[in-house]
Image (cartoon, rainbow, N blue to C red):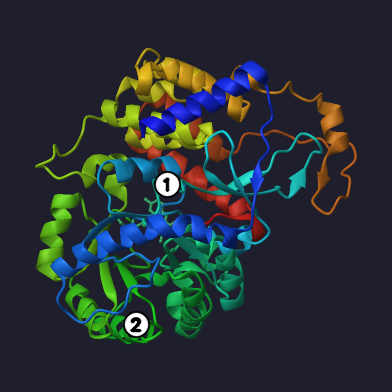
Amino acid sequence: MQCFARRLFRAASAVITTNAIATEELVSGAKSATATTASAMAAVTTAESAGAAVNARKRGPIPPRGVDYRGKVVLAPMVRSGELPMRLLSLHYGADLVWGPETVDRSMIGTTRRINPHTNMIEYSRMPTNVVPHVTKESIIYRIDPVREAGKLVFQIGTADPDLAVQAAKIFAADVYGIDVNAGCPKPFSTHGGMGAALLRTPDKLVAILEALVREISPVFGIGISVKIRLLETAADTEALVRRLVATGITGLTVHCRTTPMRPREAAIRGQLKMIREVCHEAGVACVMNGDVESRDHAAVLMEEYGTDGAMIATSAEKNPSCFRTAQDGGLENWKEVVKHYLKFAMEVGNKVGNTKYSLGMLIEGKAPEMRLLSPPKCYTDLIKALGYADTVVDEGITMLEMARKTDQILEVGEFAPPPMPKAKKGKQQQNQNGTQVQGQKRKRTPSPGANAKVAAMKSGDKEAISEALRQAEETTAAAIPPAAATAAV
Ligand SMILES: Cc1cc2nc3c(=O)[nH]c(=O)nc-3n(C[C@H](O)[C@H](O)[C@H](O)COP(=O)(O)O)c2cc1C
């Protein structure tokens, strides 16, 4: 970790002093397989021995580069909250595996894979739909830490089509250690495309997707396929579905112990869990439980009680990823310390300031006055100053403020932001992706009701209100993004 920060510091220093533009490494996804295989194999060996200790029942073979879910307490897939810095923070506090946020198949198709020369992260990016020549930058759709996530990252795909799922998976499969199909998202923008929880009502399609990935991806890339489902209305319906799913060749099944109509605040139902675990185990498939798991220690109790192989944590980890640390190792850490680590990871990987602020909104405790300070900063320098971490020393005597300045330079934000385009010119130059000019078009900037609610919540400093407003804004944004570019939610 120290080396990493040092690397970032050196790389950024070089940028500041010479203003050199480093050449980006551009390689195909498949070429990275050899580079990542060695570390993945090491992680698999560790996983196998841990799994063997907790499980003497029938078990399917673990693909050579794939993860073993047995004995694992893992970070759940979470749109927005599951971006790279939160995954690294969860690993830092002891998460065994991390799921990335659900990402729609079409949004990965057409991306370019690069190693960011400043951060050494793998980035999949593409141009947004509307581009302003020489101004619009590529959007990063997915970011991976090839070192710290080696052997631990599961990519969750949003899909409703076996061919698209395979086409997308071929792009990123060499960089990840498992692919999970989301069959549990109840939000309309996911279900209306037939993805997420809609797949629970079209089991033939879900089975076809899983079979296609097992057939086309597992043998080539050496990783397993898994699925994340919700409960159906009756135990008999759930059992019938699970029986079909475990016969597709998947290696893992996660069950979110709520039905599709249930809201997140309703308590998870665990009555069907033992039956689901039994069906999985008969087929040699690992069963991971999800829903109201609060910490690693809590997970251990629940895994013992219900006999599941693993446990997955979402909301508790979103609030404080040190929930992955056992009480024996110190338990929950004070949020100020957690935020310090989070900021360091966010800067190291060049996370977008907006996403960093979103996650800070989750991590900062209750009604702490710091919540009010999150809204104005548009760059790391201002954020670090506002939160009072400027003089905090990170690795090798570098202060947070120095790190923030260098990150701002890499991201071209704050004092390093390019000068804004004159408005009329910007309108004239705007064009959509197929090159058609949108002459003289003026973008009217009317704040949405969601944005107003967000600002009001930020000002109030009420954490619940802020979380709710941010989530609603996220839903509005995700719903507005055309399916081709969407990273889905929940
Ligand atoms: C902010 C947020 C984003 C989520 N995004 C996803 C997602 O991308 N894919 C998914 O399968 N579930 C998603 N979920 C659901 C969680 O993975 C998990 O199933 C659910 O929150 C229940 O776990 P918990 O009781 O520990 O919160 C999301 C949940 C939250 C809170």
Residue contact at pointers 2 and 1, CB within 8 angstroms? no
Q: In this view, does 305 lie to the left or right of 178?
A: left
**Percent position of residue 377, x then y:** 51, 22
With respect to residue 140, does 162 lie above or below?
A: below
Residue under the image location 61 percent in, 76 percent down: 163
Between 41 and 489, the one nearer to me in the picture: 41
Residue 147, labelled with which disc? 1
Q: Residues within 10 Å of mark 1 (few under 14, many from 20)?
A: some
- Quarter occupied by residue 277: bottom left
With respect to residue 235, does 379 lie above or below?
A: above
Instruction: Give the residue type at disc 1.
Output: Val
Q: Is residue 113 left or right of residue 240?
A: right
Distance from mark 1 CB to nearest ligand 1 atom below 8 Å: no
Between 167 and 362, the one nearer to me in the picture: 167
Mark closer to the chain start, 2 or 1: 1
Q: In this view, does 85 lie to the left or right of 51?
A: right
Distance from mark 2 CB to nearest ligand 1 atom below 8 Å: no
The quarter in which the C terminus is drawn is bottom left
**Percent position of residue 113, x then y:** 62, 52
With respect to residue 458, does 187 lie above or below?
A: below
**Percent position of residue 312, x then y:** 28, 58
Q: Residue tagged by mark 2?
A: 246
With respect to residue 80, does 29 lie above or below?
A: below
Foreground tag (2 vs 1): 1
Instruction: Give the residue type at disc 2.
Output: Val
Residue under the image location 14 percent in, 45 percent down: 326
Is any part of residue 18 visible from this angle? Answer: yes
Is any part of residue 263 visible from this angle? Answer: no
Q: How far apart are marks 2 and 1 (CA)?
A: 31 Å
The quarter in which the N terminus is drawn is top left
